[in-house]
Image: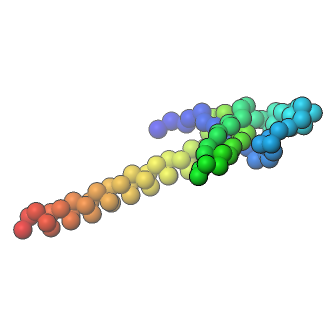
């Protein structure tokens, strides 16, 4: 596996849900640019007839060596867990059908 260009969360609070002044918007954009933000993800959702927004500043960049190692570790863990569950299922099925 190779390093990937991914979106990474940037810790910057955006309170735009109930409207935002142009002045505040400009301040937020300037601050986010200084933090390296490349895009803002705005996701709308409805839960029990209540609408909400998730607003998240993101930085699209290549992952660092540490982030790469962490991602590879997580992928390997998931693969090992899948294999473990499959082997458990295989053992259960053998027990049922090889009698």
Q: Residue at x 50, y 47 (%)?
A: 72
57 left or right of 99? right
Q: Residue at x 57, y 44 (%)?
A: 68
- Determine the image quadrant of residue 63: top right
Q: Residue at x 56, y 35 (%)?
A: 4
Q: How many marks?
A: 0
- Determine the image quadrant of residue 26: top right
Q: Is residue 1 visible?
A: yes
Q: How is the image coloured?
A: rainbow
Residue lying farthest to the front in this orientation: 49
The percent position of residue 13, horizontal first and vertical second, equals: 80, 47
- Determine the image quadrant of residue 92: bottom left
The percent position of residue 95, horizontal first and vertical second, equals: 15, 67
Viewer-side residue, 1 vs 82: 82
Residue 99's place in the image compared with 42, above or below, is below
Residue 73's place in the image compared with 23, above or below, is below
Q: Residue at x 60, y 36 (%)?
A: 6
Q: Quadrant of the C terminus?
A: bottom left
Residue lying farthest to the left in this orientation: 99
48 left or right of 27? left
Viewer-side residue, 13 vs 4: 13
Q: Is residue 27 visible?
A: no
The percent position of residue 90, horizontal first and vertical second, equals: 21, 59
52 left or right of 26? left
The percent position of residue 75, horizontal first and vertical second, equals: 46, 49
């Amino acid at each position: 596996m190779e390093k990937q260009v991914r979106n990474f969360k940037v810790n910057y609070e955006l309170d735009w849900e109930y409207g935002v002044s142009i002045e505040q918007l400009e301040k937020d954009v300037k601050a986010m640019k200084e933090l390296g933000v490349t895009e803002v993800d705005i996701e709308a959702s409805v839960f029990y007839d209540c609408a909400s927004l998730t607003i998240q500043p993101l930085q699209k960049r290549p992952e660092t060596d540490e982030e790469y190692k962490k991602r590879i570790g997580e992928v390997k863990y998931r693969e090992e867990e899948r294999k473990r569950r499959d082997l458990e299922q295989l053992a259960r099925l053998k027990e049922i059908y090889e009698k």
